[in-house]
């Protein structure tokens, strides 16, 4: 906006002000006086009441700022921050991620496929996830995102997806949102650019919050955003703070970044559709994850975890924090789904994923990653994998799928409510996004890809000239897609070669190791391909076997558990890694983190082990056993057979005693203590206040200490110094005698003394400020400290048993019995989330929720129409019943949701804690509505029964009417039914109230009823009753991840009745009575009024009907002659006339006067009345306000009372 | 997809624990071979009565018992609470039922107001009086306080015929507070109740005297109330007994009790012997020590488990077999393991036997039954 030129201040040159100024100038500067002194009145207390009020108000504001203090449960080493890059298709998401990754790690990742984890700083790691344009992905990612980068195509404006995503975020706890405007280079005009920026910014602010951060990425340089802008964005991301969200701090979750199928290949061969066992890897977030817990995988379903184990961090933070910045080795990148990762440890194997590095190495490496990544990208079967050409073919098919998105969005755009929606076509034309692969734009794409490649080469070689980047030069190069294809077979040996080099650097490595290594690499690759891995060669070593192996290797400790075969493999490997670390820097940086981890762990483990051995005579073992569970279901096998026919059924004493023992909590005492004996009695002597107290709590010592503290003092007035005599004496004695012996005690004492002094000081000085809030906060802080410290020095292996796996760990979660489609239709572009479920959240029940139709959704929702809800981790289809609560607490069924009001909804769904937000969409497949989020709300209550009722009017007709009693029929069918409703109140349509009295014998269902008035035969009697409605038990999880690749957004569940009718072409026959017919109005014909003769006679004359005969002609004799006046008479008449007219005029004038006077009077009266009304109104207002305030106060206090017990 | 398979158990041992934990965790339970090799197989009456009580306080519970009563399938519903009246079977005392209710009550939808009828005191189970003086203060430490929390003996009914009546009310809470009960403190006073029904009121006085004779050697602050109930509130059987509780400066309550043998079962006891025995039992309890007495160990461990995801610590005396079983069940149902550290008494300390420090991280449990408005 242009700044308006403001009128400048004009100095006065003449007049009193100028004179004053001049005088001042002459006298020199006046001595500045204190405002308060100069104008004391302005600062004096004007009104005590007002002052009290202002004080009150400031206190109120201060208190309002308080949040309920929560225990800080953030882990010491937090998991990577999940950064979700969201935006409509072709807005530049992948480019941004690529640029950010390059910014942080100086590495290039060509295809963003699945989560990419990087180390971004000394204390922070980031996981980038790209959100594709599918509402399923949007919902899932909104639940796990810590930070959302919301990309907005500035050339187009906002798109519905953006708003939908924001609303999804809002429901599931609002993560941090940062807007990024792209395509700013399409604006030719600077003014329109700034205008658009401003407009978008303000709209964004209204959606997120005022002042939300919005970044502008102006223009691309060689297919990348400008380095400086990306750097700035990166800085913002790496310093961003996050707030804990309720759902996430109470539920563990894992965003899987690696998936492996562990199913026995033989089983798959026999039955390709058999259930799969899959292990998923990822950082644990949220809260502690317990082994054997239940998880929900959005898009797949509920599963119980077979096993969880923690693995060394594949992307660890730098160990020592003393440098200013990270060095190149520490900027790690881990993206197994995109084929990039360092050393990967598994339960019983170690994989070296790819020797990715910097500089010249990268050139060789990149294609390998592409190979792996292309293999991952394909969802091909075994034979398909054999032929490499098919892989690319399928990859191409993926591309085609991607191309469809803009088509959809285009259609979508036409319906969006943006005024510039048409711009989508223009946008596509001059779109310079590099990740679109439409056929029409293939050429330009290739160019861009080439540019990118070239640039990479340049970076790698260190060439800085930019001349080469001409389009012509690019065109000469081979198309990139083909290049990839060609390099697939070539790169395999290269990969092996690099390994060889690796081996050569070692001096003492046997051939076996080499082959083993290769095998492993292959195995690893196979795993990556989604092929079942050959696994579990030995018995499971329990949790994190590699840890055991570590410490064996390092300290040659003998540990009982640990499997032989794997151990040997591992132990041979580790020295090698260390060598790599020392010899080959390029290679080593990936293993560096792992090694540091290793050293530390080994030490820790041995320490913990020793401690463990020393400490416990193993009460733990006694309680929890040694690990193996006693199999309850083993039937006793040691049964004898008698003559081979009969079995001796011999009740086993011990087992039976254990299983069927008395269930009693009383702890019977052993009789070893004879409390009559003195020494036994003295064993508990100190348990009583009469016994000996501890050193630090004994009253005598405390007193002494107090004297020490307060005994010496100097009387300031007299200058006399008082000394504590006894204390000094004692001290001296103690010094002499017990100085050495109780040195430590003394030290402790001193510390204690100090502490006590400080406490007293605090109590004295902070007491005024210490509020309930402060106390609470302190308590929470103490708790948090305790939480941190309690298990700090415990070995991780033991620790996970106590607290579960803590957030920040890299875990491997094994899930059995996953549907085969999960593996066969696996697409890394779709997020896989393991959402942990709390106790009883795996159950299903009725949920009562408060729901509101979204204002932007253009249709109201109908009861019993299936709806897809996103609640907790889950997305599921269910059938809601809407209701509204009546004043008496009755839940009355509604046919439709109200337009702009909350209503209740009851569904049959998964038990989710109250207070959890949810959102509803009508369909996840395709885009049908203009705004897809149909409703939002919150869970209020869980129950196993429903309380919704539906109004039901039973109608009956009187068939016999006595005075006020009638016999009614047609309402019920049997006597029993009537008996149930005896005493119920009924009503006629005309409003006569009554009551059901008793059933009649015949006809069945008829009853006697009394009314307050006599009925007519034409009356209709009805009984208003409430019929309980039943909620259909439909709980249908949205299994979008199981859909074939490319069709994942087409999941369709149960159809609504309307859709069904539409699809099947069924139209309802309307009720004939409800149809409109032409209105025919008949002319009403009234009969003449007939009055009986008797009545006529009795009527007064006035009302008697007049028998008027038509008047005939007056006969001649009856005709009166005309009067002719005499002249005198004429005169008189004229005078009289004149007089009367004068009189009339006078009269009229007087009346007018009177009228005017009266009017005046009325006006005055009205005024008075108005004044009175006004006064009364004010009075009433005052009363109502007082009443309202009272009400509010009451409400508030009741609310407070309710919240207090929460 | 089908729900997860129910947890399998065998035998009627720890019957209450399993059902209570199942109700709290929402996990289904199947118990097989309940007294299958017994002459009188299947569930006993008191267990059936217990199941009925659970059914009363919950909504939507599914219970399947086979013909012989040797297999029980239990699918928990939601804890509902409200006003409940239950006729407890006289084979076990009300304590048997009340212990389970204590575990469930804070997690109901509406505050529980249960009237339990049956035997108030019998030798096998912890009596209502004992729970009243030990369990209630313990619950207060977990944040379950307020006016609503109380156990009231309306009528006293002795074994075998019963006829007693107990009112138990408990407010609901959304979550439990973590506790750090590591310092039991020193015993400052001993209180007790000597009761007698349908016998001479003198019995109670005799009990008091004998109990005091032992306890006076330790601490002078002893007061034992005598409680003689008459008429309608005296139940159907005669009997007498004593409940003692030692209170420490830190608010730990250690209790002990002895009841006369039920009429027609075993040898009758003298009130003097009973008083002395009870006093000795209390000393035994003091010897065991800890911040929670032996009957309430499992209750405190359960509340610790169901706390927020914070570290809770409690110092206990030696773990009773029941508690050990309970710990195992907690691991099965909530995947919570306790860190168990033994604390040996110092050489010059005379504070009873070994203590056990139990530490755990709460399961992050919140009351999913409570309605929000």
Image: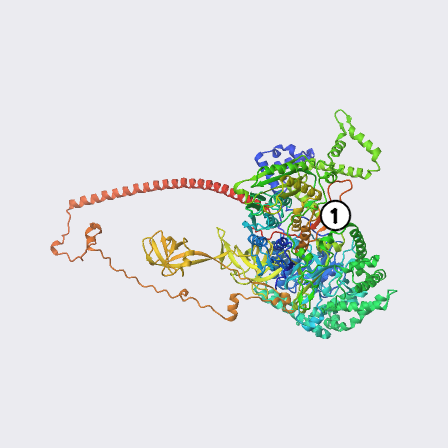
Between residues A854 and A695, which one lies in front from this camera angle?
Answer: A695
Where residue A290 sits in the image (x, y, percent)?
Answer: 69, 56
Where residue A1057 sits in the image (x, y, percent)?
Answer: 51, 66
Residue farthest toward the left in the current orientation of the protein: A1117
Between residues A668 and A436, which one lies in front from this camera angle?
Answer: A668
Rendered image quadrant of residue A285: bottom right
The quadrant the N terminus of chain A occupies is bottom right
Rendered image quadrant of residue A142: bottom right
Confirm whether residue A329 shows in the render: no
Confirm whether residue A820 shows in the render: yes
SS at mark 1 in the image: strand
Q: Is residue A300 left or right of residue B198?
A: right
Q: How is the image coloured?
A: rainbow
Number of marks in picture: 1
Q: Is residue A424 left or right of residue A448?
A: left
In the rendered image, which residue does mark 1 sit on? B342
Where residue A207 sits in the image (x, y, percent)?
Answer: 61, 55
Residue farthest toward the top in the current orientation of the protein: A718
Residue farthest toward the right in the current orientation of the protein: A507
Between residues A425 and B29, which one lies in front from this camera angle?
Answer: B29
- Write the residue at 56% across / 41% down: B198
Rendered image quadrant of residue A523: bottom right
- Write the residue at 82% across / 38% down: A743
Where residue B254 sits in the image (x, y, percent)?
Answer: 66, 42
Chain holding disc 1: B
Q: Residues within 10 Å of mark 1 (few under 14, many from 20)?
A: many
């Amino acid at each position: 906006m242009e700044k308006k030129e403001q009128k400048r201040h004009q100095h006065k040159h003449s007049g009193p002000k100028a004179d004053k100024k001049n005088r001042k100038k002459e006298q020199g500067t006046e001595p500045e006086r204190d405002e308060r002194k100069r104008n004391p009145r302005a600062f004096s207390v004007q009104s005590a009441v007002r002052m009290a009020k202002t004080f009150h108000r400031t206190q109120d504001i201060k208190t309002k700022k308080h949040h309920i203090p929560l225990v800080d449960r953030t882990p010491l080493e937090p998991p990577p921050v999940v950064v979700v890059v969201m935006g409509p298709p072709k807005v530049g998401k992948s480019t941004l991620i690529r640029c950010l990754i390059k910014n942080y790690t100086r590495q290039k990742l060509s295809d963003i496929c699945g989560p990419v984890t990087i180390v971004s700083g000394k204390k922070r790691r980031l996981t980038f996830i790209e959100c594709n344009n599918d509402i399923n992905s949007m919902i899932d990612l909104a639940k796990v995102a810590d930070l959302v980068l919301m990309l907005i195509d500035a050339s187009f404006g906002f798109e519905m997806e953006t708003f939908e995503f924001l609303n999804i975020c809002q429901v599931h706890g609002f993560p941090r949102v940062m807007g990024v405007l792209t395509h700013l280079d399409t604006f030719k005009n600077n003014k329109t650019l700034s205008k658009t920026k401003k407009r978008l910014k303000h709209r964004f602010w209204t959606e997120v919050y005022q002042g939300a951060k919005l970044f502008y990425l102006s223009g691309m340089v060689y297919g990348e955003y400008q380095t400086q802008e990306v750097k700035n964005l990166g800085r913002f991301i790496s310093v961003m703070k996050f707030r804990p969200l309720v759902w996430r701090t109470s539920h563990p979750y894992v965003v899987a970044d690696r998936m492996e199928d562990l199913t026995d290949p033989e089983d798959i061969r026999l039955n390709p559709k058999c259930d799969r066992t899959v292990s998923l890897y990822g950082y644990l977030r949220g809260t502690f994850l317990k082994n054997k817990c239940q998880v929900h995988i959005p898009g797949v379903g509920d599963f119980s975890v077979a096993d969880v184990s923690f693995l060394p961090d594949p992307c660890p933070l730098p160990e020592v924090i003393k440098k200013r910045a990270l060095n190149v080795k520490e900027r790690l990148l881990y993206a197994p789904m995109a084929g990039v990762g360092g050393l990967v440890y598994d339960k019983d194997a170690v994989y070296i994923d790819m020797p990715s590095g910097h500089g010249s190495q990268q050139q060789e490496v990149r294609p390998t990653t592409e190979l792996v990544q292309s293999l991952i990208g394909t969802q091909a079967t075994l034979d398909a994998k054999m032929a490499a050409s098919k892989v690319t073919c399928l990859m191409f098919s993926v591309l085609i799928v991607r191309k469809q998105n803009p088509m959809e969005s285009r259609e979508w755009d036409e319906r969006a409510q943006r005024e510039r929606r048409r711009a989508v076509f223009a946008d596509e034309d001059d779109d310079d996004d590099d990740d679109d692969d439409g056929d029409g734009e293939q050429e330009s794409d290739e160019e861009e890809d080439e540019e990118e490649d070239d640039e990479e080469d340049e970076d790698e070689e260190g060439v800085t000239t930019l001349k080469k980047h001409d389009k012509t030069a690019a065109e000469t190069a081979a198309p990139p897609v083909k290049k990839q294809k060609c390099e697939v077979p070539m790169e395999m040996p290269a990969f092996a070669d690099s390994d060889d080099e690796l081996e050569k650097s070692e001096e003492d490595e046997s051939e076996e190791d080499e082959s083993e290594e290769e095998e492993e690499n292959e195995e690893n690759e196979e795993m990556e391909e989604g092929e079942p891995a050959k696994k579990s060669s030995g018995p499971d070593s329990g949790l994190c076997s590699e840890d055991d192996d570590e410490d064996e290797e390092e300290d040659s400790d003998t540990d009982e558990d640990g499997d032989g075969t794997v151990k040997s493999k591992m132990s041979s490997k580790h020295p090698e890694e260390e060598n790599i670390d020392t010899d080959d820097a390029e290679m080593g940086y990936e293993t560096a983190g792992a090694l540091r981890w290793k050293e530390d762990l080994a030490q820790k483990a041995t320490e913990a082990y020793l401690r463990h051995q020393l400490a416990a005579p193993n009460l733990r073992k006694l309680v929890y056993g040694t690990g193996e569970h006693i199999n309850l279901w083993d039937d006793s096998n040691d049964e004898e057979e008698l003559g081979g026919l009969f079995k001796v059924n011999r009740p086993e004493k011990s087992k039976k005693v254990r299983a069927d023992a008395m269930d009693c909590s009383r702890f019977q005492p052993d009789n070893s203590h004879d409390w009559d004996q003195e020494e036994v009695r003295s064993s508990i002597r100190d348990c009583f206040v009469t016994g000996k107290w501890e050193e630090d709590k004994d009253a005598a010592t405390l007193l002494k200490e107090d004297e020490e503290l307060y005994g010496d003092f100097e009387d300031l007035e007299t200058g006399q110094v008082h000394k504590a005599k006894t204390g000094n004496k004692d001290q001296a004695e103690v010094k002499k005698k017990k100085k050495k012996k109780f040195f430590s005690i003394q030290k402790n004492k001193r510390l204690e003394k100090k502490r006590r002094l400080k406490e007293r000081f605090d109590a004295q000085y902070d007491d005024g400020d210490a509020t309930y809030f402060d106390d609470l906060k302190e308590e929470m802080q103490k708790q948090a400290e305790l939480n941190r410290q309690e298990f700090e020095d415990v070995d991780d292996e033991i620790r996970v048993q106590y607290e579960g796996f803590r957030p920040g760990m890299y875990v491997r979660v094994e899930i059995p019995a996953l549907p085969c489609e999960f593996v066969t239709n696996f697409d890394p572009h779709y997020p896989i989330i393991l959402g942990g479920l709390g106790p009883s959240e795996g159950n299903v029940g009725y949920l009562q929720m408060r729901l509101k139709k979204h204002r932007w959704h253009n249709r109201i929702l109908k009861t019993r129409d299936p709806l897809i809800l996103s609640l907790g981790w889950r997305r599921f289809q269910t059938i809601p019943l809407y209701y509204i609560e009546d004043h008496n607490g009755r839940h009355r069924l509604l046919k439709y949701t109200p337009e702009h009001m909350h209503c209740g909804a009851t569904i049959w769904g998964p038990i989710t804690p109250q207070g959890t937000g949810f959102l509803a969409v009508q369909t996840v497949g395709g885009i049908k509505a203009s705004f897809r989020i149909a409703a939002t709300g919150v869970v209020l209550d869980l129950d196993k029964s429903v309380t919704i009722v539906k109004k039901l009017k039973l109608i009956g007709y009187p068939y016999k009417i006595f005075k006020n009693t009638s016999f009614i029929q047609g309402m019920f069918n049997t006597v029993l039914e009537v008996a149930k409703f005896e005493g119920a109140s009924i009503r006629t349509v005309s409003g006569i109230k009554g009551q059901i009295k008793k059933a009649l014998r015949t006809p069945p269902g008829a009853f006697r009823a009394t009314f307050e008035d006599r009925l007519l035969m034409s009356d209709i009697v009805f009984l208003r009753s409430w019929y309980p409605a039943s909620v259909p038990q439909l709980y249908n999880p949205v299994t979008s991840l199981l859909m074939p690749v490319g069709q994942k957004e087409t999941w369709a569940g149960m159809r609504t009745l309307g859709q069904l009718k539409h699809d099947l072409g069924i139209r309802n026959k309307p009720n004939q009575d409800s149809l409109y017919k032409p209105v025919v109005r008949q002319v009403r014909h009234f009969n003449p009024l007939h009055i009986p003769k008797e009545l006529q006679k009795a009527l007064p004359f006035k009302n008697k009907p007049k028998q008027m005969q038509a008047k005939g002609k007056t006969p001649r004799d009856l005709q009166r002659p005309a009067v002719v006046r005499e002249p005198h008479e004429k005169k008189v008449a004229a005078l009289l006339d004149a007089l009367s007219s004068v009189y009339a005029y006078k009269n009229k004038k007087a009346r007018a006067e009177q009228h005017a006077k009266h009017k005046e009077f009325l006006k005055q009266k009205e005024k008075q009345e108005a004044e009175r009304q006004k006064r009364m109104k004010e009075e009433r207002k005052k009363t109502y306000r007082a009443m309202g305030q009272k009400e509010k106060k009451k409400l508030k206090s009741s609310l407070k009372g309710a919240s207090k017990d929460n | 997809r089908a729900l997860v398979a129910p947890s399998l158990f065998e035998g009627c041992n720890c019957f209450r624990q399993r059902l209570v934990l199942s109700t709290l965790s929402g996990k289904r339970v199947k118990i097989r071979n309940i007294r299958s090799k017994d002459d009188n197989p299947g569930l006993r009456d008191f267990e059936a009565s217990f199941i009925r009580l659970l059914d009363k306080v919950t909504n939507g519970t599914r219970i399947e018992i086979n013909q012989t009563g040797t297999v029980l399938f239990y699918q928990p519903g939601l804890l509902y609470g409200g006003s409940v009246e239950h006729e407890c079977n006289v084979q076990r005392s009300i304590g048997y039922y009340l212990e389970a209710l204590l575990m469930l009550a804070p997690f109901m939808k509406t505050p529980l107001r249960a009237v339990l009828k049956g035997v108030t005191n019998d030798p096998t189970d912890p009596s209502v009086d004992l729970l009243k003086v030990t369990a209630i203060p313990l619950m207060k430490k977990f944040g379950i306080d307020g006016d609503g929390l109380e156990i009231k003996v309306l009528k006293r009914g002795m074994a075998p015929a019963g006829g007693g009546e107990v009112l138990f009310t408990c407010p609901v809470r959304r979550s439990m507070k973590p506790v750090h009960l590591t310092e039991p403190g020193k015993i400052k006073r001993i209180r007790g109740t000597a009761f007698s029904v349908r016998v001479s009121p003198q019995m109670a006085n005799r009990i008091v005297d004998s109990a005091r004779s032992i306890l006076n050697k330790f601490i002078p602050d002893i007061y034992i109330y005598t409680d003689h109930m008459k008429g309608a509130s005296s139940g159907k059987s005669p009997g007498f007994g004593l409940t003692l509780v030692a209170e420490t400066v830190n608010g730990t309550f250690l209790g002990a009790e002895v009841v006369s043998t039920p009429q027609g079962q075993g040898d009758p006891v003298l009130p003097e012997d009973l008083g002395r025995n009870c006093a000795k039992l209390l000393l035994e309890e003091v010897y065991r020590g800890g911040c929670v007495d032996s009957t309430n160990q499992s209750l405190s461990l359960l509340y610790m488990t169901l706390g927020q995801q914070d570290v809770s610590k409690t110092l206990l005396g030696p773990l009773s077999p029941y508690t050990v079983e309970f710990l195992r069940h907690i691991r099965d149902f909530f995947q919570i393991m306790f860190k168990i550290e033994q604390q040996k008494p110092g050489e010059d300390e005379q504070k009873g036997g070994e203590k056990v420090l139990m530490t755990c991280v709460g399961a992050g449990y919140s009351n999913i039954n409570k309605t929000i408005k």
